[in-house]
Image (cartoon, rainbow, N blue to C red):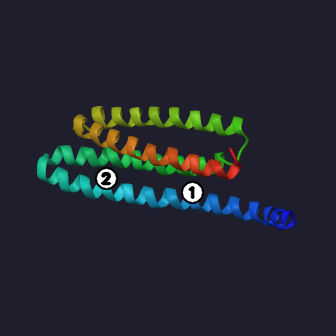
Amino acid sequence: MSAIIQAYQLIRPAQSRASISREATRFFLIWFGLLSAVLYGGGTLVMNAFSTATFTSACYIGMAMCTLTSVASFFITEWAIDQPNDIFFGVAIASIFVRIFGLVLAFGMAQFLFKINPIGLVTGMFTSYFSYLVVEIIYIHKKSLTRGE
């Protein structure tokens, strides 16, 4: 019986890690796509019924900015998750600060240079940023299972 278990353990780890890794990436892509469809599609239905055109366009701009930063974060995390823990945590913390300050800078430019509706912009940014953040945290957790942590 133990010989069968040992043989199984020799074969399984390589397949298991790749399987979990692919599963985590597939999870992220599926949920990111579904969340984007809900945010943009559901947002369109709600905003067409209850908001002005300036609010709607500002909300879409805010959502687009956060969607782009989330996609960039996905590719950075894909690279960093396989690095040693020190590098991964450094990249994760730096990514958070770069994203936040980049979004603040983009908000300032949109507000002061282009005079975009600030409430719509903030609504779109907060809604999409925190929604995507939940998916990213779950993805990182699933992806870290490949390393056995």
**Residue 4: percent from left, percent from top:** 83, 68
Q: Quadrant of the C terminus?
A: top right
Q: Which residue is mark 2?
A: 39
Dot in front, 2 or 1: 1
Kindly tell me whether residue 76 is visible in this rendering: no
Q: CA distance from mark 2 to mark 1?
A: 22 Å
Amino acid of disc 2: Leu
Comes first in the chain, label 2 or label 1: 1
Answer with the quarter of the image where residue 55 lies: top left
Q: Which residue is mark 1?
A: 24
Outermost residue toward the front? Answer: 1
Q: Is residue 25 above or below residue 130?
A: below
| Neighbourhood count class around disc 2 (C-alpha, 10 Å): few under 14, some 14–19, many 20 upward | some
- The residue sitting at 25% across, 55% down in the picture is 42
Kindly tell me whether residue 3 is visible in this rendering: yes
Question: In the visual, does 33 lie left or right of 117?
Answer: right
**Residue 51: percent from left, percent from top:** 14, 46
- The residue sitting at 62% across, 38% down in the picture is 91
Q: Quadrant of the N terminus?
A: bottom right
- In this orientation, which residue lies closer to the viewer: 17 or 50? 17
Amino acid of disc 1: Ala
- In this orientation, which residue lies closer to the viewer: 10 or 47? 10
Contact (Cβ within 8 Å) of mark 2 with mark 1: no
